[in-house]
Image: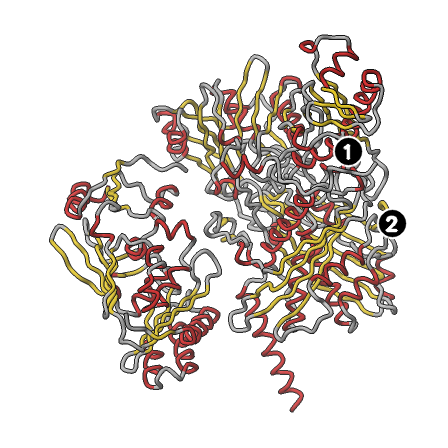
Amino acid sequence: MGPNEAGQRRQRKDIIDKVTGRARYTSDLEVPGMAFARLVRSKVAHGAIRNIDTSAALALPGVVCVVTAKDFEHLDMYYGESVLDQPFLSVDRVRYIGEPFAGVVAETQEIADRAAELVRLEVEELPILENAAAAMHAETLIHPERPADPELANVCSRSVFEYGDVDRALAEAVYVHEATYTFPAVYHYAMEPHAYLAEWTSAGLDMWAGTQQPHKVRADLARIFGVPHNQVRVRVPYVGGGYGSKGQAKYEPVTAAMALVAQRPVRLVNSINESFHTVIRHAAVVTMRTGIGADGRIIARDSQVVYDTGAYADKGPRVARKGAYRSAGPYSIPNSRAVGIAVYSNRVPAGAFRGFSTPQVVWAGESAVDEIARHLKMSPLEYRKRFLTERGEPFLGDDAPMDADLPQGLQLAADAIGWDQPRPPGRGRGVGSGVKDGGGGAARVEAEVHLHRDGSVEVVASTIELGQGPQTAYAQIAADGLRARFEDVRVRAVDTWGQRFDPGTNASRSTISVGSAVYDAACQVYAQVCDAAEQVMGTSQDLRLDGPDVVAGGQRKPFVEVLAEVRRLQPDWLGSVSAIGVQDTTKGDGPLGYSSSFYEVGHSAVEVEVDPETGVLTLVKCASVADVGFAINPEGCEGQDEGSTVMGLGHTLYEELEFNGPELINPSLVDYRVPRAEDLPHDFHTILLENRDGPGPFGSKGAGEGGTLGIAPAVANALEDATGVRIRDLPLTPERVWRALRAHEEAQQLNIAEDRS
Amino acid sequence: MSMSPFELHRPDDLLSAVRLLEKYGDDAVLHMGGTELLLLMKLGFAQPGHLIDGKRIADLKRLEVADDRLTIGAGVTHRRIERHRDIAHMMPALVSLEKAVANIRVRNAGTLGGNLCFAEPHSDPATLLAALDATVDLVGPQGGRTLPLREFLIGAFATALAPAEIMTRITVPLPRVGARVGYHRLALKERPTVAAAVVLDDRRCEVWIGALTAKPLPVPEAAAVLASSAGRDVTAAAEATRAAVLAVDAGEGDDYRAQLASVMVRRAVADAQPRLAL
C-alpha cells in the first residue's frame, strides 16, 4: 500500500517551540547544585608545557576547582574518531591557539569567566606550522608519536584508491587537463554553540549534551572514565544546529572530568568565539589531472587532495579517505587514482562538516570538467550529460550501482534557470553536479513504536532533532505504518539510557536507516491491532486509527475497549501495543569496505551577473535539484536543500576563516560573513526529484547535503561563462574577481598588441 | 563571556547626567542604544562600573526640521530619522543611508549621537554628515561648545569629547534648494567597505570617502573638478579620488580599495538627488 501521510507537506513538530523560545536546549538546562565552567585556552600556537599556575584562579572567592591534565593522570585522556590523539585537556603540549589546557568551575558563570583569565600557562615555544603546506615539509612534528609517512611530514593519514591503469591512460589521452584548486577553511555556524551538562550520581555519569552521536560519546566516556556503558547516560535535548560540528566527542569528556573533581553537576557552554576554536571544515588543496580520449570521454583521473586537519585528527582521516574516493565522481571514469592526505598543522582541528569532504573535491572536479568541455568546444551541460554515470552502472569502479538518473536531474536544474534561453548581456550560466555515497548502510539499527491505550503514538528512535526534521518525518512514517493520524504521533528526544543504538545523526543517513526501522515497528503494531480488531470487531477491513478510535469495516470502537477485550483486562491495567523495528544492512564489499546504501545527488544551476567595476558577483537565478527518491515531508526536504545550497553559497562567495599565521582573526559573527536573505535571488528554487528509487521508506533517500556539493563550481563556471575568467580559489570574493578580471583584460590587451606587432 | 557587573543610573536631565559622569570619571560611560557599547562589554573590551543611561533625557530626543537645517538630538534613533517624512523629502540621501544601517533591531535602538561618538571608522552617517559639514553640540562640566563634526572625529574610535562631556545634538546645515546630495556604499561585510558622499552645489562641492581610513577622508581635488564642471566631469573626479586613496597609508589604500572609492564616487554622483524645499 502506498503512503498516505508521507508525502504531505507538514509543518515541523518542533517549530512552534523553537520560534516561541519554549524549546529547551542544553544551554538552558539547570539542575540543583549546578556549578558553571569555563575552559582556559592557549594563546600560544605550539609549545611544550612547563607549568600551569592555577593559584590566582583558585584564590578567587566562588571558585570550586581548577583542573588540568595533572588531575587526571589515572585516566586515558585521549579521544578521537579513528586516531586517539586529542587529550581532553593539554597534557604535555599545546598545539593550537584556542586549545583548552585547564578548566575552571565556579558558583556563577561570571566567576568562572574571571577565574579563567587568571590561569597562567608557561610554555617553551615550538616552531609554528601555520597550515598544511608548511607542515608537510617541516622538520618539526606536531605529533611525534604518530607513525611517519614515507613522503611527507606531519601526515595524519593517507588513503589511496586506484583502479584501472591511470598512467597508461594518461599517456594515451589526446588531451590532459591539469589544475590545482583551493577551498577555504570555514565554520559551521550552528546557532547554538557547543553545550554540555554533566553530573556523577550513584547510578554513574549523567550527561546532557548537544551532540550528533550520543552512542559514540557514551562509548568514549565509558572508556575514558573506566565505567561500563550501562553507567553512562547521554541525553540530548533540542540541538541548535550541528552540520557535523557536534559529531563524535567534543567537550563531553572534559565536562565530565570537571564534574568529577567538583563533585557537583557542571555545565559548560561555549561562547561563539570558543566554538570557532573547537572544530572547523578542512581547507583543501586539490590537484587533478584528467585525461580525455578521442571521443571526448574522460579516460583517466589522477587526483591528490590535501586536507588541513589542524592540530588533532578529529574526523580528518575519514574526511581525507572519503574525499579521495569521491574525487573521481560523478562521471564514469575507467582509470582512476586518488590520494587523500590529512595533514596536521597548528590550526583549529577540522572535522565533519555537511557534505563531508565532498564539496572540496566537487569544487575541483566540476570546475575541471567545465574547463575541459570549453576546451573541447562543447556545451558544459551536454558534455556532462553524455558522461555522467548511468543508472545501474557500478559507481567509481565497483561500488553499488548508481541508483539515480543523473542526466535527468541535471537537465531539470538547467531547465529551471532557462539554460537554453538567450543570455542577457553581462550574465553567465553554470552548472555543477555532485554525488556523495550516502550513509546509513552497514549498520543494524532499531526503533520502537508504542500505541498507547488512548490512541496516542510514541516513537522512540535515536535520531537527533538538529532542525533537519526527524521528529516530523518519523511521525509521518509511523502514521503511515499505523494508518494513524499525524497529530497523534510524538517522537521522543534521544536518551541512550533505554533507547536503541544508532551510530549517529550524520551522513544523511537517518531517514533510510532509522526511518526504515520506525516504519517496520509501526507496521508490526498495525498488524497486532488488526489481529485484535478481527477478534473483537470481527473485521480489520481498511483499518485505521482515528485518534482514540479504531475504524474498520464500517465500524468504530475505542481502541482501549478493543485492547481490553482482547487482553481480558480492565482498562486501567492496559498499557500499549508496542513493537521493535529493525533495519539491518549487511556490510557488503565496496571500495570503502562496504557498499554504498544510496547516492546523495545534488545538481546546481545558476545565472550570475558580475559588476566589472567592483568584482561583486550577484546571483540572479539559482536552482537546485535534490534527488530524494521520495519526499516524506516535501516542505522539510525543500528547506533542507535550500539550507544546504545557501550554506554552499557561503564558501562560494563569502566565507573564509582568515588566519594570521596560526591565529584565527575573524572568529565572530560580525567579522565572519555568511550569506544573508538579501543575498539570495528571488528566482531561487529547489526541485525535488522523486523516482522512488531509494532504500528508505516509500523509496526515499537521504537528503540535506546535496545542495552544498555543486553550487561553488556552478557559480565559478557561470563566472567564466559571463566574463571568460576562470578562478580556481574560493571564495569568489569581489576583490578576487576584480583582480582576475583585470589580469584577464591586461592579458587580452597584450595579446592584441602582440598580434599587431 | 559575561559582562562584568555595573551600576545603572537613569538621570532625567542633562545636568544630572554630566554630574554623574563627572563623579564616576573613567569608570562611567554614557549609554544610549547600547548597540556598540554592550557588544564591547560582552567581549570584555569595556568594563565600566557605571552606565549613565541617557534615554530618559528629553533634550536628547528632539528632532527639528527647518528650511536651512536639521537639528537632530544625539539620542534620536536611526529608525526615527529613516521614517521622518520631511527628511525623506528634503534629504533623501540621508534617509536611504539610514535605512541601510545594520539591521532593523539595531536601527530601532541605536542613535545617531551614539554612532558618531563611537567613531567607528566604518560609520555610514559620519561620512555623509562630514560632507554636509554638520556640527555637534557638546555639554560638559565647563558648559557647552559646538564643534564641526570634521574636527570632532579625531581617528578610529577617537573623538574630541572631553571627560564628562555629552553630545547633545547634531546640526546639519542643508545645502541650498536644488543642490544635489548623494551617498553610495559597498558593504561586503557587516559594515561598509567603502563609501562615498558627494554634495554638488554650483558654488561648493564636497567629496568624502568613508570606511577606508580612520575617519572620513575629504577629496578636495575631486570636489574641485566637480565644482568647475557643474558636477559633470565625473570621470576626472573618480580618477582624482583614486589618486587620493592611493596616496594615503599604503596598507589601506591599495589599488582595489582605490578602485572601489572611485566607483563609489561615480555612483554617488549618479545617485545624487536634489535637495527640495520643505
Seen from the viewer's position, the closer of residues A154 and A112 is A112
Q: Which residue is mark 1?
A: A516
**Does residue B90 show up?**
yes
Residue A39 horizontal/vertical position (percent): 47, 33
Neighbor class of circle 2 (other Cα within 10 Å; few <14, some 14-19, many 20+) is some
Kindly indicate whether the residue at mark 1 contacts the one at mark 2 (C-beta within 8 angstroms).
Answer: no
Callout 2: residue from which chain?
A: A
Residue beneath the point at 32% across and 69% down: B90
Residue beneath the point at 75% across and 23% down: A556
**SS assignment at label 1:** helix
The Cα–Cα distance between marks 2 and 1, rounded to whole angstroms, is 25 Å
Residue B137 horizontal/vertical position (percent): 19, 59
The part of the image, by quadrant, that contains residue B124 is bottom left
> In the rendered structure, which amino acid carries the disc numbered 1?
Ser
Q: Which residue is mark 2?
A: A394
Residue beneath the point at 26% across and 46% down: B55
Residue A524 horizontal/vertical position (percent): 80, 25
Neighbor class of circle 1 (other Cα within 10 Å; few <14, some 14-19, many 20+) is many
Residue beneath the point at 83% across and 66% down: A292
**Residue most extreme to the front:** A554
Q: Is residue B118 left or right of residue A479?
A: left
Display coloring: secondary structure
**Residue most extreme to the left:** B142
